Structure formats: C-alpha cells, structure tokens
C-alpha cells in the first residue's frame, strides 16, 4: 500500500502512515469492518419507485404461533375440547369480542382490524417463519428451521434494499434479536437477505430485558469529536481519489464507502440519543411494561419518529430458552401460559404502543401488523407436527390464523375475513403471506412487482407475488 502512495503523481497529496492509520481510525468510533457492514444501505442500490409519502410500518412478529381460537377468533359455541377454557368479552366496538385476558386491547379495538383469514400450508416453525417474513412458500423440504443462503429475502431485507430513509438512518431495523432456537448455529429461516444477499440484512438493534438497546460497536469515543471524524472521512476520500490502483477492487471500495457513510450518518443523526430510552418518562416506560417486548415497542416508536421506514420487533420472553414451547408455542399448558405470561405482556405493551403512536400523530402513517408464523389446532391435544403436544396444548396450524392490523389507513373496529365454526379453515376473504407482504410494501411505497436478480442462480424474481389488500380502509 505504501508503494502505491510513492508512485502517485506529483499532483497527489503525500500521505503519511499516520494519516492512513487515522483513516482506519474511522473505526475508532467503535466500529469494526464487520460491524460497519451491519450499518449499510442508507442509499439504495437500485432505483425504486418514488414514495407516495413518508409512510412507515412496525411488524410485530409473535414468534411461536399464537392461538387464534383462544385469543381473537373465539368460538364459544364449539365443544369444550375446541373452545377451551377462556371466555369472550365485549370490546369498545359493538359486535366484536376477544379473549377475556386481553382487557386493554378490548378498549383499543376501535383502532384495530382483526384480519382473521390468514392462511398457508407450512406447519414447521422455521419454514413457516420464512413464509410469513418473505411472503413466499418455503423453497425446499421443511427439514430445518435454520436460515440458508437459498432463503427468500425477508421483508426487512427488501425494505433495506428498496426502501427510503430521508433522515440518514437505515430504512429497516430489527429488534431486539434475530430469532434463533437454543442450540442451533444459525438464525431461524427467513430473516436475512437470503438469495438477495446478506449485505441487505436489516440493521439489528440488540435489546436486553432491562430496556437497554445498542448497535454492536456504535459507541463513539467522547474524546474524538464529530469534526475530527469528519476530517478522517475527507482524508479517506482523498486517499481513494489519489490512488487509481484501488480500482481493481472498486466494488470493495464502494462497499466500504457505503458502510463508512452509514456509520458517519448514524453519528450525525445522534443514533445514541435515539436508542436511549431514559429520554422517555418512567411513567411511559411503565405503561408499556418493563419487558423486552414492551420496551422494544417503545423503541420502535422512537425509530419511526426518527424516520425509519420498517421496524421489525421480534417477540421475546423468558421461554425463548425452551426448545419445545418457545414464546407463543403452546404444545402444553396452553391456557396457563396464555393467562399468566403471554396475554399480560401483550395486553400491556401492544395497546400502549397503539395509544402512544396516536398521541404522537404517527398512527395515521404507520401501519402496525402483529402476526405469528401460524395459529394453533382447533382441537386440544390434536397432533399435526410435534409429538411434544400434550392434551393441555395445541399444535401448529397454518390453515387459519389471525393478524392484527392498525393505523396506516386501515379502518379500526372491523373484522376482515372469517373462519369456520372451529376457527380451523378460512371461509371468506383469504389472505396469504404473499398478500400481506405486498400490502406492507405497497404502504411503504415500494413497488412489490419490481424484480431483483438472485445471488444463487442469477434468476429474476419479483419482490412479492401477492396482491395488496386494498379494501381495509
């Protein structure tokens, strides 16, 4: 490298080894090259459609698959082994009933659309997650839950590549974790750029149970001023302009440029302040609940307010360490787990989030979607996929499940679609994961019909083969 400096033309600056190290000192912001790669994609690689307006979306993924029949598509007239232990209660909207253990949600039902007609055919967690995250049927036999390079790109990755960010922040963020079963070496399928390329993975903001959030490495040394970092940035540009021998690795240089610009932009836009929940009142934080999902939804509101287009919030609770009954997966003790853990967490965090968005004037432009990878079997103890299913539990069921939608022009206080008398099969207005992904992309101003070239086969694929559900307003 030093030889290339010596061979530069007389008109080029003479650069010392110290200055080269200073350019490397862009990483003195606390960012390694690998970590910088996670902060990319502020400028889009491909020209996409012009945004209709600065819309946003929060995608709350209820990992494990919540029971539609016990929560928001109850069938009180069914037999006991189907209807279960819970009773339906009236909501703020006459004629709409939900589970008795969701009283706060019941009072926010005027903001919510219960889309009861979600359906697909995959009953294995990872491939089903992949289908809901990507909007496409799983690419091969469902023999693993783990992500592979052949996965279809996630909605978060599609937005990272084609979405907009007018504030310098990434278009797409995931928090507080990428889903991963204990003991597995890779993320659960469907959460990455997959065949579009992992460089389009959304930026991960890691969260802890006490509401602390961070991007790995995004911690600037207070002794290094923003002006000094800017000087290093300019020096890096001069180095590249003065060294035509770098052209052999033009793509690598362009990637480094993008990552460096993203890191600098995050500092310029005071990402550390955005990630500091202590700037919110203790009362508001308590309203959300001092849980991972509660504080993550509060962080999602801050990110949306700051200009991020898509925030994916992956459900997290203490049962994520379980290999057989993870989060909303209720193969046994279904009612006790819903009653004592899942419903209280959801009923505190989700209604608080909707109200907070509304109070900040963000609900009209922010589409909120809460959904799992599938529902649960209509009959207790019914076996469909897991031999761990007990008489007190419900197994996986992709044939009919519910998504909760709010904001973003969706009319609250309505039920869209319907199921049979056992909440087992869709009988009206079916919606596929492809349709849901197309709906979200449409809301974000991303043309869901545009194509990209896959990394693994060089084939062209549309972002989504679904159709936006446009009659929700």
Image: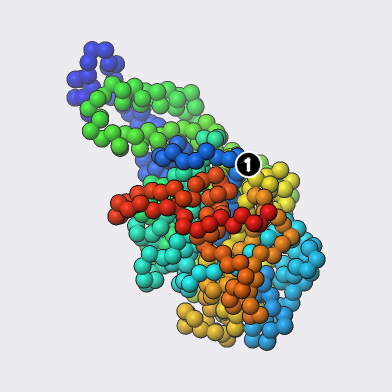
- Number of dots carrying numbers: 1
Categorize mark 1 by other alpha carbons within 10 Å: few (<14), some (14-19), many (20+): some
Could you tell me which quadrant the N terminus lies in? Answer: top left
Residue 346, position as x, y percentages in the image? 66, 63
Q: What is the x, y in percent for residue 240? A: 31, 26
Res. 402 in view: no
Q: Quadrant of the C terminus?
A: bottom right
Q: Position of residue 277 (x, y in %)?
A: 63, 45
| Res. 373 visible in picture | yes
Residue placed at 68% from the left, 47% from the top? 364
Q: Which residue is mark 1?
A: 305
Mark 1 secondary-structure assignment: helix
How was this image coloured?
rainbow
Choose between 85 and 373: the one closer to the eye: 373
Q: Where, by quadrant of the figure, is residue 360 drawn? A: top right
| Residue 189 picture location, percent across and down | 42, 62
Toward the viewer: 275 or 371? 371
- Position of 134 with respect to 59 (left or right) is left
């Amino acid at each position: 490298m030093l030889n290339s400096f010596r061979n530069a033309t007389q008109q080029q600056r003479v650069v010392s080894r110290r200055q080269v190290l200073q350019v490397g000192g862009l990483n003195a912001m606390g960012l390694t090259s690998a970590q910088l790669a996670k902060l990319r994609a502020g400028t889009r690689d491909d020209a996409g459609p012009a945004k209709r307006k600065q819309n946003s979306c929060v995608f709350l993924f209820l990992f494990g698959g919540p029971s539609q029949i016990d929560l928001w598509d109850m069938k009180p007239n069914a037999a006991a082994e189907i209807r279960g232990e819970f009773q339906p209660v009236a909501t703020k909207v006459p004629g709409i009933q939900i589970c008795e253990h969701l009283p706060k949600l019941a009072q926010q039902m005027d903001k919510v659309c219960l889309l009861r007609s979600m359906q697909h055919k995959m009953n294995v967690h990872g491939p089903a997650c992949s289908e809901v995250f990507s909007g496409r049927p799983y690419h091969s036999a469902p023999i693993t839950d783990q992500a592979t390079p052949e996965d279809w790109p996630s909605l978060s990755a599609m937005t990272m590549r084609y979405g907009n960010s007018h504030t310098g922040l990434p278009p797409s963020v995931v928090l507080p974790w990428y889903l991963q079963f204990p003991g597995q070496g890779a993320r659960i399928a469907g959460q990455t750029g997959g065949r579009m390329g992992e460089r389009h993975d959304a930026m991960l903001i890691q969260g802890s149970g006490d509401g602390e959030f961070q991007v790995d490495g995004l911690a600037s040394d207070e002794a290094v001023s923003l002006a000094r970092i800017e000087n290093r940035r300019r020096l890096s540009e001069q180095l590249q302009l003065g060294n035509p021998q770098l052209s052999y690795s033009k793509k690598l240089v362009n990637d480094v440029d993008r990552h460096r610009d993203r890191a600098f932009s995050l500092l310029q836009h005071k990402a550390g302040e955005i990630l500091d929940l202590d700037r919110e009142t203790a009362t508001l934080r308590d309203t959300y609940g001092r849980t991972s999902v509660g504080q993550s939804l509060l962080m999602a509101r801050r990110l949306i307010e700051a200009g991020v287009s898509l925030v994916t919030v992956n459900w997290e609770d203490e049962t994520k360490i379980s290999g057989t009954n993870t989060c909303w997966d209720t193969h046994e003790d279904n009612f006790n787990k819903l009653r004592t853990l899942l419903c209280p967490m959801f009923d505190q965090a989700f209604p608080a989030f909707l109200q907070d968005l509304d109070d900040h004037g963000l609900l009209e432009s922010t589409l909120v979607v809460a959904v799992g990878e599938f529902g649960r079997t209509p009959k207790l103890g019914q076996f469909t996929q897991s031999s761990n299913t007990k008489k007190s539990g419900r197994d996986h069921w992709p044939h009919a499940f519910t998504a909760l939608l709010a904001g973003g022009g969706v009319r609250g206080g309505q039920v869209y679609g319907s199921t049979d008398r056992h909440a087992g099969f869709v009988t009206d207005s079916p919606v596929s994961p492809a349709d849901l992904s197309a709906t979200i992309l449409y809301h974000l101003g991303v043309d869901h019909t545009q194509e990209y070239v896959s990394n693994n086969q060089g084939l062209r694929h549309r972002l989504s083969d679904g159709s936006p559900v446009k009659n929700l307003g």
